[in-house]
């Protein structure tokens, strides 16, 4: 059975340019909850602190919190980019991470070469690779640009290619940051429909976003992160009632009532 279990996970990042005594004193005094002196008396940022939760099939988890609260760090930890200093992550199921439009791309290769590289990484056979290339080229609508190095692409074109490659297969566990909703207006409608299909097909979703409306629509559980720690874990209505300003929560409830059944 697909599941994701996070047990007492903590992440810290050494600050290698904080050896100045006055700087260290200022940091520790002003934000002691996030900074500490570790081994060799080096200041570290505690990015995540004692995070625990379990997700099972049909769980749709949203992450809320201010910038710097730890949302993206948690997603990167779940995807294997960061290794916990303590704690354990147990995963049963294939993970698809939509965290960075450049993820896994070689900017010096052409778009087509990047697609072939991704197909090789996924272990696709010849027939699957041909279908993979066709799907990405049709969806990204890059046309002749597919034969040019990715470094020559605009940021919007990079997002198109990265998005198309990342969303070509239905995932078991889907990790998403809100870059996925970026891009030019002509691309957004296609992207949103493709994302909705992926979310529906995924057994487990973890989504970090500042959009209460998106989280309300797609998630059945929220975790509110603050200073790298879990402040609240509950249903979207419970967490949003505590997290949002009263007028914003009232607007969210009103918008939800107006949605078609």
Image: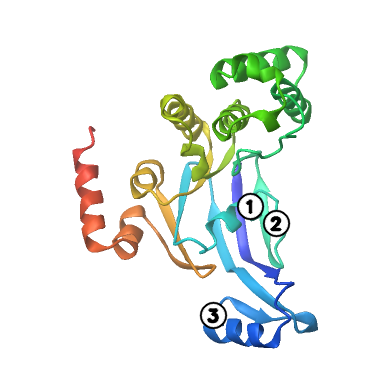
Q: Residue at x 54, y 32 (%)?
A: 156
Do the residues under discs 1 and 2 have CB atoms within 8 angstroms?
yes
Q: Quadrant of the N terminus?
A: top right
Q: Residues within 10 Å of mark 2 (few under 14, many from 20)?
A: some
Q: Residue at x 53, y 83 (%)?
A: 30
Q: Earlier in the sequence, mark 1 or mark 2?
A: 1
Q: Nearer the viewer, residue 24 or 190?
A: 24
Q: Return the residue at label 3.
A: 31
Secondary element at tag 1: helix
x then y, percent, for residue 27:
59, 81
Q: Residue at x 46, y 45 (%)?
A: 60
Q: Quadrant of the C terminus?
A: top left
Q: Quadrant of residue 132?
A: top right
Secondary element at tag 2: loop
Q: Return the residue at label 1.
A: 76
Q: Earlier in the sequence, mark 2 or mark 3?
A: 3
Q: Return the residue at label 2.
A: 82
Instruction: Give the Cα distance between marks 1 and 2.
Output: 6 Å
Q: Earlier in the sequence, mark 3 or mark 1?
A: 3
Q: Relative to 105, is 238 on the left or the right?
A: left
Do the residues under discs 2 and 3 have CB atoms within 8 angstroms?
no
Q: Is residue 132 visible?
A: no
């Amino acid at each position: 059975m697909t599941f994701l279990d996070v047990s007492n996970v903590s992440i810290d990042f050494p600050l290698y340019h904080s050896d100045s005594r006055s700087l260290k004193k200022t940091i520790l005094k002003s934000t002691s909850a996030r900074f500490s002196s570790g081994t060799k008396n080096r200041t570290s940022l505690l990015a995540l602190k004692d995070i625990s939760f379990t997700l099972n099939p049909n769980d749709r988890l949203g992450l809320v919190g201010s910038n710097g609260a730890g949302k993206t760090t948690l997603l990167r930890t779940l995807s294997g980019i960061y290794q916990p200093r303590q704690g354990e992550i147990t995963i049963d199921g294939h993970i698809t991470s939509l965290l960075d439009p450049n993820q896994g791309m070689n900017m010096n290769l052409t778009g087509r070469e990047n697609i072939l590289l991704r197909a090789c990484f996924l272990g696709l056979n010849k027939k699957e690779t041909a279908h993979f290339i066709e799907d990405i080229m049709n969806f990204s609508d890059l046309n002749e640009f597919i034969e040019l190095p990715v470094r020559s692409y605009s940021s919007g074109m990079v997002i198109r290619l990265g998005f198309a490659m990342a969303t070509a297969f239905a995932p078991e566990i889907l990790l998403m940051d809100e870059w996925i909703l970026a891009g030019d207006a002509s691309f957004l409608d296609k992207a949103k429909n493709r994302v909705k299909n992926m979310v529906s097909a995924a057994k487990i979703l973890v989504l970090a976003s500042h959009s209460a409306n998106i989280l309300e629509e797609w998630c059945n559980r929220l975790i509110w992160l603050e200073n790298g720690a879990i402040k609240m874990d509950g249903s979207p209505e419970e967490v949003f009632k505590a997290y949002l300003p009263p007028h914003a929560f009232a607007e969210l409830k009103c918008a939800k009532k107006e949605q078609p059944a």
